[in-house]
């Protein structure tokens, strides 16, 4: 890897800012596109796909701040939902391992000329979440109280991702601050298994319930949808925020305006 292209920003002493490495030279695996020219979306889709392939293969600076992409670890998720017909659950998921993002297909990558937000269509042939759960509540009218291993597997996952960004300047480059990620999900098929659903009181009832959930997987997914959406949003926000604090936005969108031009005087500049 080409070390010369990386600038090491030393912590700014007083503020105790974490040291961040940024690329100051565009690596060859990034294709630049021009947003003010025709066919930008086509170019951007191709560019982001190739870039994500490289991220999956491993970019040391991303692995250092984010960890491995596939499978990826996620810290705990605390989840509560009371206002739904199909589910009222409080769940904690811990020790989560999410697989499938390595086979991410970028179907379309649009960037807004107005505010440089993104609209991205992503497809995953398969996503799998493994973890430990703790759950109290009701799913499909089944009262649950248990803790144990959970596996959730989704085939043919379509993700429509809306990403908000704010541009800023650093070391003479324009960067994206990825500030929010919202997703809409469509699934082909869902399988789950939860061990110890009734605190181990009856193995048979547990198996029967898991079977029931899988027989009614569409309803089950609707019940769990907010939980899955939150997991995917958090994962993508974390990944994208970290990735785009390392790679300047101008590597991807060559003719991106700088933040001063886009926002006027209210823009933010980091001088370190
Ligand atoms: C989840 O964790 C929170 C705090 O960590 C706790 O207050 C809550 O009771 C837990 N929920 C379940 C269902 O265990
Ligand atoms: C990015 O945005 C967040 C808030 O959304 C803010 O706290 C943070 O300081 C911003 N980072 C940069 C580098 O502008």
Image: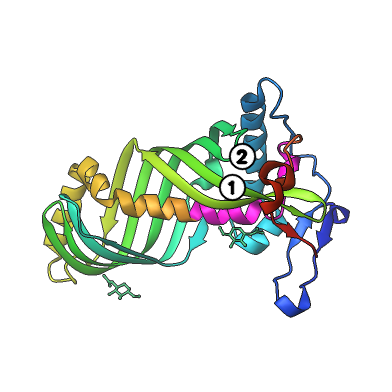
Segment colored magenta: 235-253
x then y, percent, for residue 239: 57, 54
Q: Is residue 236 magenta?
A: yes
Residue 70 in view, yes or no: no
Question: In this figure, which residue is indicated by the disc labeled 1?
Answer: 165
Question: Going 41% across and 38% down the picture, which residue do you hit?
Answer: 157
The quadrant holding residue 29 is top right
Question: Going 76% across and 73% down the picture, which residue do you hit?
Answer: 11
Mark 1 and mark 2: Cα distance apart in space: 7 Å
- The residue positioned farthest toward the bottom in the image shown: 14
Answer left or right for 144 relative to 230. Answer: left
Q: Report the magenta stretch's main SS.
A: helix
Front residue of 272 and 9: 272
- Mark 1 Cα shell of 10 Å, populated few (<14), some (14-19), many (≥20): some
Pointer 1 with pointer 2, Cβ within 8 A: yes
Residue 8 in view, yes or no: yes
x then y, percent, for residue 268: 69, 56
The vertical placement of 192 against 198, above or below, is: above
Answer with the quadrant where ligand 2 appears in the image.
bottom right
């Amino acid at each position: 890897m080409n070390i010369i292209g990386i600038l090491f920003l030393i912590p700014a002493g007083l503020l105790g800012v974490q040291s961040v490495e940024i690329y100051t030279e565009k690596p060859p695996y990034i294709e630049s596109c021009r947003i003010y020219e025709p066919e930008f979306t086509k170019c951007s889709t191709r560019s982001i796909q190739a870039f994500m392939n490289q991220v999956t293969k491993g970019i040391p600076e991303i692995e250092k701040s984010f960890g491995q992409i596939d499978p990826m670890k996620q810290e705990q998720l605390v989840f509560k939902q009371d206002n739904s017909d199909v589910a009222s659950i409080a769940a904690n998921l811990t020790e989560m391992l999410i697989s499938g993002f390595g086979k991410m297909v970028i179907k379309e990558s649009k960037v807004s000329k107005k505010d440089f937000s993104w609209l991205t269509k992503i497809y995953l042939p398969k996503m799998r979440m493994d973890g430990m759960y703790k759950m109290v509540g009701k799913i499909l009218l089944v009262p649950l109280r248990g803790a144990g291993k959970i596996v959730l597997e989704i085939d043919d996952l379509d993700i429509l991702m809306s990403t908000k960004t704010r541009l800023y300047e650093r070391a003479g480059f324009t960067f994206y601050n990825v500030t929010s990620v919202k997703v809409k999900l469509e699934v082909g098929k869902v399988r789950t298994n939860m061990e110890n659903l009734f605190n181990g009181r009856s193995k048979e009832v547990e198996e029967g319930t898991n079977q029931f959930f899988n027989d009614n997987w569409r309803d089950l997914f609707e019940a769990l949808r907010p939980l899955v959406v939150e997991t995917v949003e958090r994962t993508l926000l974390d990944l994208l925020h970290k990735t785009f604090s390392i790679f300047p936005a101008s590597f991807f969108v060559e003719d991106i305006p700088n933040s001063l031009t886009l926002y006027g005087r209210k823009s933010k500049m980091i001088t370190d």
